[in-house]
Image (tube, helix red, strand yellow):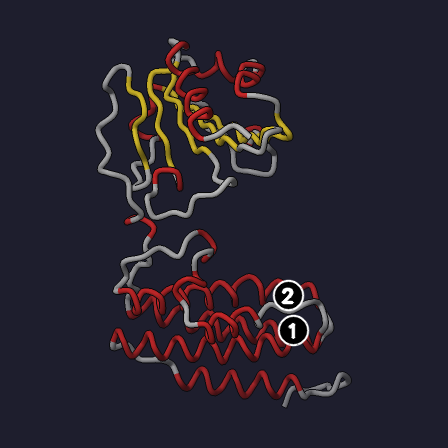
């Protein structure tokens, strides 16, 4: 596997010899001094270029970077939003295990298309056209303190969609129930857990994409309970996960509300919790809920 220096020499070497490439920016975890370093870190690179069509009209030029296991061109996919003619991305996984996410941005639109994020670093600027970035850090990705409305909206969404899970479970619609549980309900639980981490760290840390660093900041007991909320496809296990998610949400939400001085909707919690238990015990041939 090519090491970081070899990959960077390749990335910058191409930019230096190709007159169409005018600037190079690195984004993502490789600019973050706080991010764990491992062999799966991708190289997230932007080339600011003249004549973007000369690159995208014949993709063979990317063979310069090595043999690939697979590649994705999201700007040509029918599954994603319409492409921007001034932007084009190559997502590449190479046979040696390295991954390069390479985005081309047209010179004429660079001011509009370059994301000035806190994890960005200029590696090359032939024409001095890009305003300097501050020293990279994770400030844009740290847990943000919620407003009172955001806190209440999170609580409302969690308890409201929990009733959808119960409906799906009673109807024996496992894919629907799981979609609601693992989609909106879990998303709100994750949001509250992030805010809980914020209250214990004075909102100075990032928990990473999809909460991948959560374990580092949660008490062991909370983390173990959170892990227990991931069920298989058995109906009883999904019910148990739903009830456990409610207990965990309540615990951390009360901590967050206390820290921030916000009101927790105890009445919604109590009413929905009672409803969920009632539906759990509802006979499969019931014609009325109550």
Position of 265 with respect to 204 (left or right) is: right
User: Mark 1 touching mark 2, by CB under 8 A?
Assistant: yes
* CA–CA distance in space, label 1 to label 2: 8 Å
Of 17 and 184, which appears nearest the observer?
17
Toward the viewer: 2 or 272? 2
Would you name the residue on which mark 2 appears?
A: 178
Query: Mark 2, residues whose alpha carbon is within 10 Å: few (<14), some, or many (≥20)?
Result: many
Relative to 244, 69 lies left or right: right
Residue at the image point whose x is 35% and y is 70% from the top = 151
Q: Give the image location of residue 47, x and y in percent.
A: 40, 23
In the displayed structure, 214 sits above or below 170; it is above
Relative to 244, is 253 on the left or the right?
left
Say if 64 sits above or below 169 in the image: above
Element type at marker 1? helix
Q: Residue furthest right?
A: 285
Residue, disc 1: 238
Q: Residues within 10 Å of mark 1 (few under 14, many from 20)?
A: many
What residue is drawn where x is 41% and y is 68%? 218
- Residue drawn at 25 percent across, 64 percent down: 202
Task: Pick whichever, 61 or 201, lies toward us.
Answer: 201
Q: Residue 73's image quarter?
A: top right
Quarter of the picture containing the C terminus is: bottom right
């Amino acid at each position: 596997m090519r090491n970081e220096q070899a990959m960077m020499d390749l990335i910058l070497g191409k930019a230096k010899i190709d007159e169409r490439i005018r600037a190079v920016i690195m984004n993502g975890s490789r600019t973050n001094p706080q991010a764990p370093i491992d062999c799966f870190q991708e190289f997230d690179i932007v080339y600011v270029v003249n004549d973007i069509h000369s690159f995208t009209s014949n993709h063979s030029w990317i063979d310069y970077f090595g043999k690939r296991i697979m590649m994705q061109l999201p700007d040509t996919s029918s599954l994603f939003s319409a492409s921007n003619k001034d932007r084009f991305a190559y997502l590449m996984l190479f046979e040696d295990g390295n991954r390069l996410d390479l985005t081309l941005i047209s010179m004429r639109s660079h001011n509009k298309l370059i994301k000035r994020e806190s994890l960005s670093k200029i590696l090359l600027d032939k024409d001095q056209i890009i305003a300097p970035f501050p020293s990279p850090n994770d400030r844009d990705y740290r847990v943000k303190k919620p407003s009172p409305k955001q806190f209440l909206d999170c609580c409302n969404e969690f308890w409201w969609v929990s009733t959808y899970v119960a409906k799906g479970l009673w109807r024996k619609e496992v894919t629907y129930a799981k979609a609601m549980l693992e989609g909106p309900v879990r998303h709100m639980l994750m949001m509250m857990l992030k805010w809980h981490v914020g209250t214990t760290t004075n909102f100075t840390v990032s928990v990473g994409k999809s909460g991948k660093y959560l374990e580092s900041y949660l008490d062991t007991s909370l983390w173990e309970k959170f892990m227990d909320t991931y069920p298989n496809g058995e109906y009883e296990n999904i019910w148990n996960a739903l009830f456990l998610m409610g207990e965990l949400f309540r615990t951390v939400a009360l901590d967050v509300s206390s820290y921030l001085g916000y009101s927790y909707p105890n009445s919604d919690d109590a009413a929905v919790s009672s409803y969920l238990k009632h539906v759990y015990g509802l006979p499969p041939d019931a014609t009325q809920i109550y």
